[in-house]
Image (cartoon, rainbow, N blue to C red):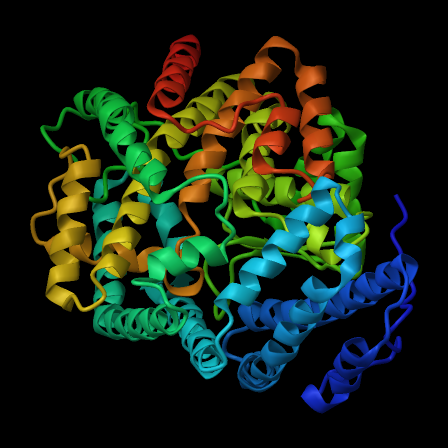
């Protein structure tokens, strides 16, 4: 596969975005351009799309470089400069371009679903835009990056070495309980050190977000954000029903699985450092030693599923669009960042050699394939995929790749890895519901105190937990466990999508158990749509319903339970 960035038709190839003055003339030209025909309208849309892609890619690289090395002040300042000086200047121009767009008579010529979805998003942005929110959004963007810097600086000392929290967490799978306890207590001490700072940061973000919502005429930030995220296909009531269904159908199943593990350990309750170990005394799964091995094995797996998938990763490797190993100063977590101009995304993660890392790699690989399959779509807006669809791509790949994990494991370990994956799929659903329920409460009650926030999280932990872990001496870690979720700080309300997409992914996987080639073909066709069809139609193209009701959730839970029986 050969990838080349398309030649620019509107902006200079050597444009360096040092400040807003550099790009202002292109916004002015789009605003002042006379549009007298449908063909001129198409050209205007294309030129605006190019400008959007260039700007988004410039910001993307600033974020990527900063997250790879948070200690580098120049990289941090480059990102901060964009979000505090360039982005605020963009907002009024974007609003004026949106006004011009909806005022043109040629919209009526575009009755296809792709353009109608795009125009719907433009109208929504117009409804939400308030000039007084520009400075607040800039402050929010600057504050949100503090979370990554704080988290990236978290390290423990072990045997004379400094370990990142990701590296330390891998040791919690060791069979030596004394080692696990020591590591856990060191990690707890580090997290306690930052609790007050993260709590204050979150309070500040909540206050500013609430003001944004009020300025835009909304009662709370939740209602504002549902519109801003384009949640046209479901409501907050659907989310509440999802929370209830998780408590009814998934929590008891997770508790049953955990109880069996507890019995094998011969304990009445887990200690916090016991929850990640194999109860039969087996060492933690270690599929690879480093990121290079992980990538090589993943390419082989993707080749076996579909050669196109493996070639996507080869292109990314050749272009240097991968940073996979955990290292000091690197922001936590993992992501696939779309790069809309070149159409080749960037995968960032913190691999330390665990099974969880392999899951993350195929997850982000699914996102990457999505970017490749949708890169030829005509407009940047068509490639700006809603999270409910984006996560369908990534979570489906986690499950679709399971038969190929033999690239990393002998047969017995392969079975065990698949079992851990399915158990993890169940285990994460209550966490998703808890994080989402927490956000609803936080923004419905924006004037709450830190103590009230901790108390509410504690109650949610009871509602969505199994009650099988003894947290004596670590109660504060339970009350502040939400601080470990990056989304709360950086991308608010982006989390229920994981639950919705997980049910869709389970449907794709169910189809693959019945007809693997057909399931892969449907998966590719769905991803190639980008956001040129409704969520419901994209899911249907993938061969699954857009349905996260209690009935659907119950049937998929039964599927997992049955498949786990086969792996025992």
User: Which of the image's four quarters has the N terminus?
Assistant: top right
Q: Where in the figure is residue 544, as x and y percent of width and height?
A: 56, 22
Q: Where in the figure is residue 359, as x and y percent of width and height?
A: 52, 38
- Which residue is rendered at x = 63% and y = 44% of the image? 367
Furthest-bottom residue in view? 21
Picture quadrant of residue 29 = bottom right
Picture quadrant of residue 221 = bottom left
- Which residue is rendered at x = 61% and y = 24% of the image? 406
Left or right? Give the position of 293 relative to 183. right
Counting labels gives: 0
Left or right? Give the position of 278 relative to 296. left
Furthest-front residue in view? 105
Say whether residue 486 is visible: no
Left or right? Give the position of 492 relative to 350. left
Q: Where in the figure is residue 375, as x and y percent of width and height?
A: 78, 49
Say whether residue 264 is visible: yes
Left or right? Give the position of 5 relative to 248. right
Establish if 41 lies above or below 21: above
- Of the pair 291 and 433, the residue shown nearer to us: 433
- Of the pair 252 and 493, the residue shown nearer to us: 493
Q: Where in the figure is residue 82, as x and y percent of width and height?
A: 60, 81
- Of the pair 17 and 257, the residue shown nearer to us: 17
- Which residue is rendered at x = 46% and y = 27% of the image? 547
User: Which of the image's four quarters has the C terminus?
Assistant: top left
Establish if 164 lies above or below 93: above
- Which residue is rendered at x = 14% and y = 68% of the image? 449
């Amino acid at each position: 596969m050969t990838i080349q960035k398309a030649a620019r038709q509107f902006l200079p190839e050597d444009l360096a975005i040092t400040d807003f003055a550099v790009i202002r003339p292109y916004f002015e030209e789009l605003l002042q351009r006379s549009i007298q025909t449908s063909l001129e309208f198409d050209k205007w849309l294309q030129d605006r799309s190019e400008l959007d892609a260039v700007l988004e890619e410039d910001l993307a690289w600033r974020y990527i470089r900063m997250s790879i090395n948070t200690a580098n002040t120049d990289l941090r300042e480059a990102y901060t400069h964009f979000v505090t000086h360039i982005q605020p200047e963009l907002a009024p121009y974007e609003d004026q371009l949106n006004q011009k767009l909806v005022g043109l008579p040629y919209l009526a010529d575009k009755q296809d679903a792709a353009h109608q979805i795009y125009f719907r998003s433009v109208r929504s942005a117009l409804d939400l835009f308030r000039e007084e929110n520009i400075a607040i959004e800039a402050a929010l963007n600057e504050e949100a990056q503090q979370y990554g810097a704080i988290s990236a600086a978290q390290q423990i000392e072990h045997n004379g070495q400094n370990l990142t929290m990701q590296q330390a967490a891998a040791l919690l799978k060791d069979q030596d309980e004394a080692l696990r306890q020591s590591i856990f207590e060191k990690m707890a001490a580090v997290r306690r050190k930052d609790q007050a700072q993260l709590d204050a940061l979150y309070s500040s973000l909540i206050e500013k977000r609430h003001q944004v919502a009020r300025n835009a005429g909304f009662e709370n930030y939740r209602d504002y954000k549902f519109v801003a995220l384009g949640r046209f296909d479901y409501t907050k009531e659907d989310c509440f029903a999802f929370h209830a269904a998780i408590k009814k159908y998934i929590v008891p199943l997770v508790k049953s699985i955990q109880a069996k593990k507890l019995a094998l350990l011969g304990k009445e309750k887990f200690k916090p450092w016991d929850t990640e170990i194999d109860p039969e005394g087996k060492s933690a799964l270690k599929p690879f030693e480093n990121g290079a091995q992980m990538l090589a094995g993943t390419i082989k797996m993707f080749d076996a599923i579909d050669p196109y998938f493996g070639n996507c990763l080869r292109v990314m490797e050749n272009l240097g669009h991968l940073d996979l190993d955990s290292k000091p100063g690197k922001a936590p977590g993992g992501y696939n960042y779309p790069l809309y101009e070149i159409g080749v995304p960037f995968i960032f993660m913190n691999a330390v050699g665990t099974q969880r890392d392999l899951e993350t790699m195929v997850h982000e690989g699914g996102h990457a394939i999505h970017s490749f399959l949708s890169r030829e779509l005509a407009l940047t807006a068509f490639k700006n995929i809603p999270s409910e669809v984006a996560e369908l791509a990534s979570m489906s790949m986690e499950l679709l790749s399971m038969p190929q994990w033999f690239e990393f494991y002998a047969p017995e370990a392969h079975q065990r890895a698949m079992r851990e994956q399915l158990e993890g799929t169940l285990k994460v659903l209550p966490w998703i519901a808890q994080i989402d329920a927490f956000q609803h409460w936080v923004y419905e009650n924006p004037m709450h105190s830190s103590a009230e926030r901790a108390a509410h999280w504690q109650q949610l932990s009871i509602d969505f937990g199994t009650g099988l872990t003894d947290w004596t001496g670590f109660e504060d870690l339970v009350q502040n466990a939400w601080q470990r979720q990056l989304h709360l700080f950086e991308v608010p309300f982006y989390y229920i999508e994981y639950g919705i997409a997980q049910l869709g992914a389970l449907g794709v996987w169910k189809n693959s158990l019945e007809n693997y080639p057909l399931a892969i073909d449907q998966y590719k066709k769905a991803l190639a749509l980008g956001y040129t069809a409704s969520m419901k139609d994209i899911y249907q193209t993938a061969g699954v319903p857009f349905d996260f009701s209690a009935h659907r959730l119950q049937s998929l839970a039964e599927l997992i339970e049955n498949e786990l029986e086969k792996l025992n």
